[in-house]
Amino acid sequence: MPDEDGVLSSGPTAFEEAIEDFIAHIAKLRGFSAETVSAYEAHLSAFSRWARRVELDPLVMDAREFRRYLAEMRSAGYAPRTVAAHLSAIRSLFRWMLLDGRIANDVVSTIQSPKIPSTLPRTVTGAEMERLLGAPDVSTAEGLRDKAMLELLYAAGARISELSRLNIADLRFEEGVVRLFGKGSKERIVPVYAAALKAAAAYLADGRPELLSRRGYTSAEEAFFLSRRGVRMSAASLRYRFEKLARSCGLSSDVTPHVMRHTFATDLLAGGADLRSVQELLGHAQLATTQIYTHLTPERLQRALHQAHPRG
């Protein structure tokens, strides 16, 4: 609890209260998606439980004790990327507590993140994509929905969370575009190919009305993707459907909805799209985030060199 000066006293209870206040704070910021807030909360709760178990007060821990937590995570088999994500959440919390006057020093800022091996994004081949897009049973309402989901993932490079937030009005058939809301509710308009529009139209005409009718009453529900109970599908529900379809056509477990986004970007670059355009279509804030995909398209780079270089 705060003392007479309004500063939280040290102790596990004070730290847990700080976590709650921090999570409430970032939940209000535009730059934090619901998924990011949830991940931060999970990471910080895990750290808080560890501190209780080893009887340490996070508000007065030194750098060596924080490194002990990270070392135990590595010993438990956590990947460097996961350890780095936990440290990032803790670092953000302590930076906020320092600015808020809840701590006098921020020792976490001195701790280096673990080195993360550079890995190229997984993509699917043309044959794999054809199998996946052909997996849904379009004779059913659920199959029409799943077909539309897969086509839009690939056509728009959408995140699964963006499809969960998709409303009917966000698909503009006459213009051939879809409006997506990404991280921090940032809006972008993405053109989509005809087959995706056709799949979406078929779902709206023959699949969605049946799913909506299962609610037992007429509703003004605006959500595009509905569950078999006629309510908006969460990102987790859409991800579950994707994974089930991917496994049904023999694709490996590392083919995820985000792999569709990687494939979208890589195929655009391989087809000759410029990096800035792909950045805008993906909704990346920084061009450096998009540049990872150039490593996947050496043929495109070789072609550009031969076409543009005076001795090519």
Image (tube, rainbow, N blue to C red):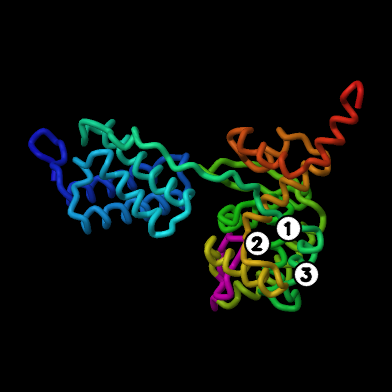
Of residues 85 and 27, which is closer to you in this image? 85
Of residues 206 and 63, which is closer to you in this image? 63
Q: Residue at x 66, y 67 (%)?
A: 252
Q: Residues within 10 Å of mark 3 (few under 14, many from 20)?
A: some
**Which quarter of the rendering shows the C terminus?**
top right
The amino acid on which the numbered mark 1 sits, given as a three-letter code, is Val
Q: Which residue is mark 2?
A: 255
Q: Which residue is mark 1?
A: 124
Label drawn at residue 134: 3
> Magenta segment, principal secondary structure?
loop
Which of the marked residues, 2 or 1, is nearer the chain's N terminus?
1
Question: Is label 2 or label 3 in front?
Answer: 2
Residue 30 coordinates in the image, percent (x, y): 46, 40
Q: Which residues are magenta?
A: 215-230
Q: Residues within 10 Å of mark 1 (few under 14, many from 20)?
A: some
Instruction: Tell me whether the residue at label 2 lies in contact with that at label 1, contact meaning CB atoms closer than 8 angstroms.
Output: yes
The amino acid on which the numbered mark 3 sits, given as a three-letter code, is Gly
Residue 91 coordinates in the image, percent (x, y): 35, 39
Against 110, residue 185 (above or below) is: below
Direction from residue 269 to residue 209 in the image, left or right: left
Residue 232 coordinates in the image, percent (x, y): 54, 64
Q: Residue at x 52, y 44 (%)?
A: 116
For this orientation, the residue located farthest to the front is: 75
Residue at mark 1 to residue at mark 3: CA–CA distance: 14 Å
